[in-house]
């Protein structure tokens, strides 16, 4: 191992990955980062959105007034110019890199958490909404409305006309909602406290996939913590952070690939640049450690650094962004 040469970097690189300091996080907040396949990257908190432009500088493109309590849910950019931001009950689109934004109405009582657009016409939003309580529903404290008459259920919205109309897929038989969604062409994965659902037809039909991985002793279904699709066929999902399942056929079948005892750390924020080389963060509240795999996720080795991380994004290329509480790093495959 050798110390990175950039004076801003506090990390140590290894033989497989190079990590370079890019400066400080632009403002205080709990940020996440995402990059698309074209190399455009953006980071966001519940109050603001920043995008990385060709000048290698982060520029704020969206912000919420300090008195506004309706926080940002999800953010997605097709390019440095075209992107979307979700807030309760609405979607906002920009076509000029954040200079102007247009409001697009979605399901009125929906709390959107994440979104993904394939192009300017086809897109998906996931989240939750309150539905009336019916006989037989469990009284789940953190899913009930204040008047105890409604309970949170998952919802998926799909548009094929840029948001003019939406088709709703309501998960009324389930409790809780979705946190994240990702797509590659027609293959998609969405997950959250509600569980994990997969589609192979662009979101027309969704299938729950975790019941087959129910614990033999307790009968409990594992909690999904992150998902990554490399392409339309190959993908990975972390379960409870200790196990990983993978697919080679677009989500039709899934199988375990990681022994829970292979590393003492639970993993999340999983990303791959190809079928064998990937990165993940340990699932720690104060910031995670960085791990690499050289065999498609079967085994993981820690990349020892002097920082802890909140988010990572690699999108089909041999580079990406690594985010800690105070610093931003570029990371690339050697």
Image (cartoon, grey):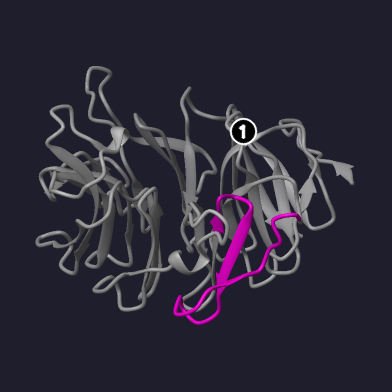
Q: Is residue 157 left or right of residue 289?
A: left
Residue visible at 49% across and 28% down?
Answer: 26
Q: Is residue 304 above or below residue 40?
A: above
Q: Position of residue 316 (x, y in %)?
A: 56, 66
Q: Is residue 19 left or right of residue 82?
A: right
> Farthest top residue?
67
Q: Is residue 171 left or right of residue 6?
A: left
If the image is split into quadrants, where does the C terminus sit?
Answer: bottom right
Q: Which residues are magenta?
A: 238-261
> Farthest right residue?
1
The secondary structure type at the circle numbered 1 is loop
Tally the numbered discs. 1
- Could you say which is closer to the camera, residue 80 or residue 237? 237
Q: Main secondary structure of the magenta part?
A: loop
Q: Is residue 36 something one can see in this rendering?
A: yes
Quadrant hosting residue 314: bottom right
Residue visible at 12% across and 36% down?
Answer: 149
Q: Position of residue 32 (x, y in %)?
A: 48, 40
Residue visible at 56% across and 50% down?
Answer: 240
Quadrant hosting residue 24: top right
Q: Position of residue 93 (x, y in %)?
A: 22, 49
Mark 1 = which residue? Answer: 287
- Could you say which is closer to the camera, residue 189 or residue 145? 145
- Could you say which is closer to the camera, residue 235 or residue 50? 235
Quadrant hosting residue 165: bottom left
């Amino acid at each position: 191992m050798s110390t990175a040469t950039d004076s801003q970097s506090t990390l140590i690189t290894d033989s497989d990955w190079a990590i370079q300091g890019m400066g400080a996080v632009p403002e205080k907040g709990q940020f996440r980062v995402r990059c698309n396949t074209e190399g455009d990257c953006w980071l966001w908190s519940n109050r603001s959105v920043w995008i990385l432009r060709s000048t290698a500088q982060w520029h704020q493109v969206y912000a919420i007034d300090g008195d506004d309590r309706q926080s940002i849910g999800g953010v997605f950019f097709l390019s440095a110019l075209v992107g979307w931001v979700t807030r309760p009950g609405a979607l906002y689109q920009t076509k000029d890199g954040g200079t102007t934004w247009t409001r697009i109405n979605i399901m009125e009582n929906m709390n959107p958490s994440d979104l993904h657009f394939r192009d300017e016409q086809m897109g998906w939003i996931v989240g939750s909404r309150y539905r009336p309580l019916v006989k037989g529903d469990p009284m789940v404290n953190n899913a009930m409305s204040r008047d105890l008459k409604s309970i949170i259920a998952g919802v998926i919205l799909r548009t094929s006309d840029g948001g003019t109309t939406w088709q709703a897929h309501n998960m009324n038989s389930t409790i809780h909602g979705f946190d994240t969604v990702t797509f590659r062409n027609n293959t998609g994965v969405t997950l959250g406290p509600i569980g994990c659902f997969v589609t192979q037809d662009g979101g027309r039909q969704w299938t729950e996939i975790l019941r087959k991985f129910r614990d033999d002793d307790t009968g409990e279904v594992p909690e999904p913590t992150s998902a990554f699709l490399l392409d339309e066929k190959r993908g990975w999902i972390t379960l409870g952070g200790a196990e990983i399942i993978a697919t080679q056929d677009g989500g039709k079948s899934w199988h375990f690939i990681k022994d829970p005892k292979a590393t003492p750390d639970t993993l999340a924020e999983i990303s791959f640049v190809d079928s064998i080389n990937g990165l993940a963060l340990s699932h720690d509240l104060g910031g995670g450690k960085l791990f690499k795999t050289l065999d498609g996720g079967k085994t993981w080795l820690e990349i020892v650094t002097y920082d802890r991380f909140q988010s990572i994004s690699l999108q089909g290329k041999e580079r990406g962004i690594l985010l800690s509480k105070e610093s931003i790093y570029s990371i690339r495959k050697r």
